[in-house]
């Protein structure tokens, strides 16, 4: 069944709901340094950061991982699924980002396994007993979405959309911005979410890339702040 | 275009075996160092053909590999594959490499390192992000400890991405990026503040350091000031050299 079915779409949207304890603090950690140094101070600055985040960072990393995990699950190649989790874990250079992503993965896995029985999720739980470092949010999300029969396009698009809105919610409080400005940034970024999903559908593992060096350095510096707005 | 190959196995004081295609070659330098045996790697920045380099650092060897100073601009097409296997107790330090892509260039490098047991690996690189030139730089740094991947870093910069890279969080308006990888299974022989105090936060210059999940550290810079960047990279490498020497001199 596809997510073009309303019921499936509702289920997919619901797993992004805050009741699932999803944490998208990870990239707010990188953003915090920009906000503190007043480099992100207006809605235009925030829009620029969102553009980097959606059209670059997420598309060429997380979206590719979701797509590749779907592909390997279709082929029933479990070893490759574990390999992708290994690469995703290694791809996150900054320890604080890694920890936050794992923390969100652990919470999400606990919650879905408490409400839903699935061989695939149980198999993953077994797998990470010896390798808890691989339990990143995007991996658990991909496994669950595949298991539920959500279509790949919607799985990627909703991931990008909710990552964007979470980031903007954090930014609104930290900068601060008026709710109207936040809505304008979100609405303007929707087209980027659409374009990013289209691009993601044409990418594969070898297209993974990193050019978010500014974000990495900001996240590295975040560790040394004496007081923090966002913590992992 | 045929590949140019270089294969070498380094042991404590000499090369165990060695095969090369001109212009690639390694040359032992007459540099006295308490623990390191130092080599110069030549030809890397001259060859127009794809390069295929395989190094093995034998058990308990301490090898420093320097890059030939760049006298001319890099070839417009460069494809480099470097595989390095570092055996137990060994250390491979690749000294600072500078990549200044010329106009109309396409540089593709893949570095795959395997550290066995308590082996250590250090790599330093400065890359110029000159947006006024037409260039494409793609570098994949893959570091493995057996079946565990420590780092997978596919950097990609090109002049075609100029507009998007200028956004917050990417390379922004900076002209240079630098990285130092120090991979070690044990906690590094220094405090992180020793490194932090060597990283300035001057205007148009940013630096940060992260722990790699207990398997080493990564230091990254974005800068518009090449001389300051070089100075900091060299300062950190000199500090590593001092600390590693203190620790390893007893093992020689």
Image: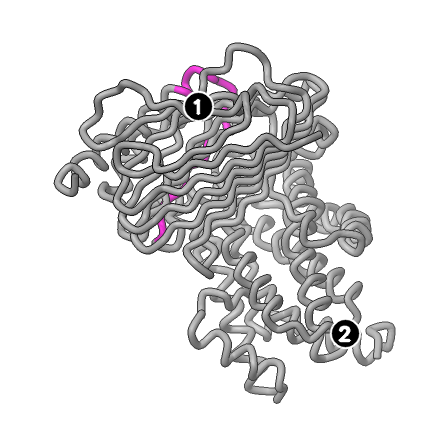
Residue depicted at x 68% and y 54% = A205
Residue A126: x and y in percent read 50, 80
Magenta span covers which residues? Answer: B215-230
Numbered marks: total: 2
Instruction: State the mark number for residue B67.
Output: 1
Residue A67: x and y in percent read 72, 62
Q: Nearer the viewer, mark 2 or mark 1?
A: 1
Which quadrant would residue B235 be assigned to in this image? top left
In the rendered image, the quadrant that contains the N terminus of chain A is: bottom right
Residue that numbered label 2 is attached to: A150
Return the chain for callout 1. Answer: B
Q: Residue furthest right?
A: A4
Element at label 2: loop
Disc 1 residue crowd, few under 14, some 14–19, many 20+, Cα 10 Å:
some
Instruction: Tell me the CA gap for discs 2 and 1.
Output: 51 Å
> Would you say B210 lies left or right of A58 here?
left
Residue depicted at x 59% and y 14% = B73
Would residue A109 be visible to someone looking at this image? yes
B229, A85: nearer the viewer: A85
Would residue A187 be visible to someone looking at this image? no
On whether residue B222 falls in the magenta region, the answer is yes
> Would you say B140 lies left or right of B65 here?
right
B134, A107: nearer the viewer: B134
A16, A226: nearer the viewer: A16
Element at label 1: strand
> Would you say A47 lies left or right of A153 here?
left
Residue B140: x and y in percent read 57, 41
Residue B53, compared with residue A22, is above or below; it is above
Residue A202: x and y in percent read 80, 52
Residue depicted at x 39% and y 55% = B213
């Amino acid at each position: 069944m596809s997510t073009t079915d309303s019921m499936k779409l509702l289920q997919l949207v619901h797993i992004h709901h805050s009741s699932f304890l999803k944490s998208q603090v990870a990239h707010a950690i990188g953003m915090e340094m920009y906000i503190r140094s007043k480099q992100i101070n207006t809605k235009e600055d925030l829009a620029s950061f969102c553009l980097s985040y959606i059209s670059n960072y997420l598309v060429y990393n997380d979206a590719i991982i979701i797509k590749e995990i779907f592909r390997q699950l279709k082929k029933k190649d479990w070893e490759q699924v574990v390999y992708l989790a290994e690469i995703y874990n290694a791809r996150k250079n900054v320890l604080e980002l890694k920890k936050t992503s794992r923390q969100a993965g652990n919470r999400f896995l606990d919650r879905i396994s408490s409400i839903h029985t699935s061989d695939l999720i149980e198999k993953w739980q077994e797998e990470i007993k010896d390798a808890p470092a691989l339990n990143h949010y995007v991996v658990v999300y991909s496994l669950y979405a595949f298991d539920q029969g959500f279509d790949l396009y919607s799985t990627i698009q909703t991931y990008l959309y909710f990552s964007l809105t979470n980031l903007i919610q954090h930014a609104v409080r930290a900068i601060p911005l008026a709710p109207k400005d936040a809505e304008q940034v979100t609405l303007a970024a929707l087209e980027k979410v659409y374009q990013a999903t289209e691009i993601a559908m044409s990418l594969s593992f070898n297209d993974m890339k990193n050019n978010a060096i500014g974000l990495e350095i900001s996240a590295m510096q975040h560790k040394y702040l004496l007081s923090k707005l966002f913590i992992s | 275009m045929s590949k140019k190959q270089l294969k070498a196995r380094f042991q404590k004081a000499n090369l165990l075996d060695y095969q090369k295609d001109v212009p690639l070659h390694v040359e032992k330098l007459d540099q006295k160092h308490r623990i390191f045996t130092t080599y110069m790697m030549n030809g890397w920045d001259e060859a127009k053909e794809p390069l295929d380099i395989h190094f093995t650092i034998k058990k308990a060897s301490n090898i420093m590999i320097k890059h030939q100073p760049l006298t001319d601009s890099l070839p417009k097409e460069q494809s480099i594959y470097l595989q390095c296997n570092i055996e137990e107790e060994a250390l491979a330090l690749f000294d600072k490499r500078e990549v200044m892509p010329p106009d109309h260039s396409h540089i593709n490098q893949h570095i795959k390192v395997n550290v066995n047991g308590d082996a250590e690996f250090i790599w330093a690189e400065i890359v110029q992000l000159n947006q006024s030139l037409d260039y494409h730089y793609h570098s994949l740094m893959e570091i493995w400890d057996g079946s565990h991947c420590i780092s997978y870093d596919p950097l990609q910069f090109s002049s075609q991405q100029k507009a998007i890279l200028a956004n917050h969080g990417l390379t922004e308006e900076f002209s240079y990026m630098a990285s130092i990888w120090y991979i070690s299974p044990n906690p590094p022989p220094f405090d992180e503040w020793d490194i932090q105090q060597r990283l300035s936060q001057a205007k148009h210059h940013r630096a940060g350091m992260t722990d790699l999940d207990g398997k080493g550290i990564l230091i990254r810079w974005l800068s518009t000031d090449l001389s300051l960047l070089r100075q900091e990279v060299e300062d950190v490498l000199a500090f590593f050299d001092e600390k590693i020497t203190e620790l390893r001199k007893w093992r020689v």
